[in-house]
Amino acid sequence: MKKIEKPLDSGSTSFNSATKDKRLRGTYPNLLKLGLRASRLARYYDDSRGDPNIIRSAGLSDREKRAILYIYDNPPASMSYIGDLRLSLAGETCPMCGGQNPGELDHYLTKQRYPEYACLSYNLVPACSCNRLRGEKLFDPITQARVLHPYYDECLGRPLIDLRFDPSATPPVFKIHYMIGEADPDFGNVKFHVDNIIRKTNFLTHISKRWGKLKAQPDAILPKHRDYRDNKNQFHEYLAELSEGKSVDEGANAWSTIFLRSISNRIISDWIFDNC
């Protein structure tokens, strides 16, 4: 989970030009009408911040749906922004789940249900394989809770979760703890995002393995930790600074940051001091 900058260009002009290209036999002339509406749809999406509680599918014909999905899968050179976006965060933190190496594209509004936004850059978020796990469940129409949008939700820039567990247990049970209160206006969306994206990944397995490695090989997980072993306060401050540094480098809700933030909890840090 990470807040990232929205693309400067919506891609609507490039898409409109592509719909008029007679050489694109897989799409021409099926997208001419949609091409004329592309800029307006982009403005509407941006004004609505991609919120599925506001945006409704335009009800395209089956022919239009097939054509727009074809052009997304086979973009012409004029729509190179699609490929550029896909690789823009390779090797970095996944904005959707907080894992590593987002080398795919997630359609925030899913392309099957909202095909008219399938080629809109504002709707295309670099992501890892987590984008294949969430399915079509994007929001709850009753509570209006929804998946967080990395281009629009500022809360992704602050710490949202950590993990609570008994460090002496073998193996420990890791429980997700929310760092924002239920009265926070973002709480419902954060919880929905965690339940429908984070929990479907191998996040907790990853954390469990990191904890196991820390106990077995603390030097591999905690660089220079032996320089901060004079007392528990010093060691706790060391872990807190390590967590903050990782947050600056990879994001407040990257998996590696969440792990370090969790073990910098005073109960955990004291246990590590005594046992590792």
Image: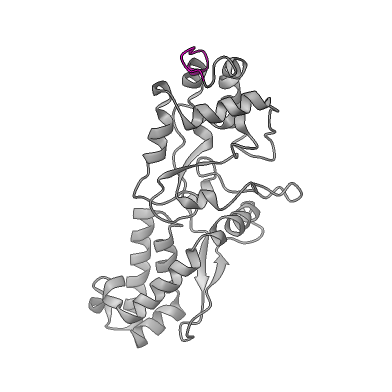
Q: Quadrant of the C terminus?
A: bottom left
Q: Residue at x 35, y 76 (%)?
A: 214
Residue numbers of the magenta segment: 18-25
Position of residue 275 in the picture relative to residue 104 (left or right): left
19 in magenta:
yes
Residue 165 x, y percent position in the rendering: 51, 78
Q: Residue at x 55, y 68 (%)?
A: 176
Which quadrant holds residue 225? bottom left
- 198, above or below 3, in the image: below
Question: Main SS of the magenta segment?
Answer: loop
From the viewer's perspective, tell me whether residue 184 is left or right of residue 236: right
- Asked if the magenta segment contains residue 69, the reply would be no
User: Foreground residue, 40 or 66?
Assistant: 66
Q: Is residue 47 visible?
A: no
Q: Relative to 165, does residue 85 appear above or below in the rendering? A: above
Residue 261: quarter of image: bottom left
Viewer-side residue, 135 vs 9: 135
